Image (cartoon, rainbow, N blue to C red):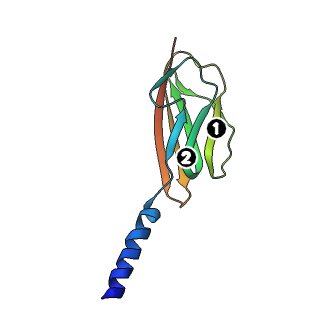
Amino acid sequence: MKQIILALVATLAIAPAALAHSKAETTTPANESTVEKVEVIELRFDDPMRVTAITLTGPDGDVEIMRETGLDPVTEFRAMPSAIMPAGVYSVDWRGLSADGHPMQGTFSFTVAD
């Protein structure tokens, strides 16, 4: 019986780590912020993430962005808009694979002021 209890305790101690996935901790611009201009789009993760897709959508549709960060797993991802972004509301959608191979995705938005 003692061995069963020890095995159960060990399993419960390991389970949270096995279930943890990378997540975006912070973004630039910050989610729901208002900024004057955007020079870079950044996502910072708590564990390495392989960002496989990222899109930036604004008031006139998709905005072209250039990835600075490749497809290697990173804790900091960077991309730059290819042009000056006019005033309006923008959203960033991303997808990737966490360090444990789990597919992840997220969205954040911000406003460029007049």
Residue under label 2:
45
Residue 22 position (above or below residue 79): below
Rendered-image quadrant of the N terminus = bottom left
Of 14 and 51, the residue lying toward us:
14
Separation of disc 2 and disc 1 at Cα? 12 Å
Could you tell me which residue is drawn at 51 percent across and 44 percent down? 24
Provide the residue designation for mark 1. 78
- Name above or below for residue 16 compared with residue 35: below
Classify residue 103 as left or right of residue 12: right
Picture coordinates of residue 98 (x, y %)?
Answer: 54, 55
In the displayed structure, 24 sits above or below 9; it is: above
- In percent of the image, x 47 and y 30: which residue is there? 109
Q: Secondary structure at mark 2?
A: strand
- The percent position of residue 103, horizontal first and vertical second, equals 49, 54
**Amino acid type, mark 1:** Arg
Q: Position of residue 89 (x, y in %)?
A: 47, 22
Q: Amino acid at mark 2?
A: Phe
